[in-house]
Amino acid sequence: GQQVMQIPQYQHVQEGEDFTTYCNSSTTLSNIQWYKQRPGGHPVFLIQLVKSGEVKKQKRLTFQFGEAKKNSSLHITATQTTDVGTYFCAVGSLGNEKLTFGTGTRLTIIP
Amino acid sequence: NAGVTQTPKFQVLKTGQSMTLQCAQDMNHEYMSWYRQDPGMGLRLIHYSVGAGITDQGEVPNGYNVSRSTTEDFPLRLLSAAPSQTSVYFCASSYWGQGDTEAFFGQGTRLTVV
């Protein structure tokens, strides 16, 4: 199956600083999805990328899928306290009944 | 719509006991899945279903059984609980379609086996 490595495992930033998490695979990925999990909460879908070199933006969040479809990144500009949580990348099957998750990056914000 | 509902939210079991984690969705999704989440390991797939009457194993199926008699419900059964099954369990539902497709997760069940 498709496996993904995610780095860093933890990131502590001052409020207002930028944050980036990376997802890497040794094989070509059919798609990459990003989920956010607040402390004590459940994963919530953020975005799905399927095309080589694809870039999508959601307000302060920018998602990229590499040209070779082997890596992806999530960048948050000017972090806010509401960004706290763990961000996971995942590779989904056609119907998303099988998701392979990265190990996640836990983001904490220093006010 | 309630989305994906899991019960119970918390459970403590003794080693060797059995129990069923309930999961129900009201979005008429074809696909349902169970994951466990352990510290530092992300979420791992236990079992999944692509429709009523159809189930299959995921990455970590040992010690767990599932069945899917209706589209709405997908219970997870622990046959004989072990401390290694202490974890947070998430149920998810999803569908195939054009454009972005996503998995919807329940609130989770935090299980402790002593």
Image (cartoon, helix red, strand yellow):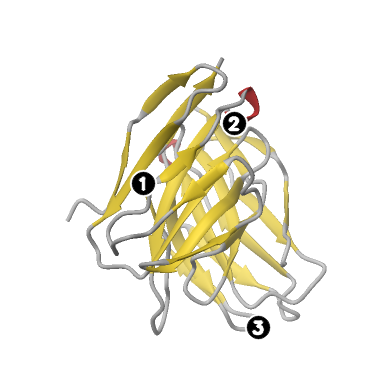
Image-based side of A17 in relation to B110, left or right: right
Dot 3 amino acid type:
Ser
In percent of width and height, residue B41 lies at 67, 41
The image quadrant that residue B69 belongs to is bottom left
The residue to which callout 1 is attached is B106
| Residues at circles 3 and 1 in contact by the CB criterion of under 8 Å | no
Screen quadrant of the N terminus of chain B: bottom left
Q: Earlier in the sequence, mark 1 or mark 2?
A: 2
Relative to the observer, which residue lies in front, A16 or B37?
A: B37
Crowd class of label 2 (few under 14; some 14 to 19; many from 20; radius 10 Å): some
In percent of width and height, residue A68 lies at 76, 80
Image-based side of A36 in relation to A4, left or right: left
Crowd class of label 1 (few under 14; some 14 to 19; many from 20; radius 10 Å): many
The residue to which callout 2 is attached is B85
| Residues at circles 2 and 3 in contact by the CB criterion of under 8 Å | no
Q: Which mark is residue A52?
A: 3
Dot 2 amino acid type:
Gln
Instruction: Give the CA distance from mark 3 to mark 1.
Output: 31 Å
Residue A34 appears in view: yes
Instruction: Give the CA distance from mark 1 to mark 2.
Output: 19 Å
Quick check: do tags 1 and 2 share a chain?
yes
Q: Kindly report which numbered mark, 1 or 2, lies closer to the viewer in this rendering.
A: 2
Instruction: Give the CA distance from mark 2 to mark 3.
Output: 39 Å
Q: Secondary structure at mark 1?
A: loop
Dot 1 amino acid type:
Gly
For the point 39% across and 81% down, the residue is B97
Q: Chain of mark 1?
A: B
For the point 50% across and 54% down, the residue is A35
Residue A84 appears in view: no
- Spot the residue most to the right: A26
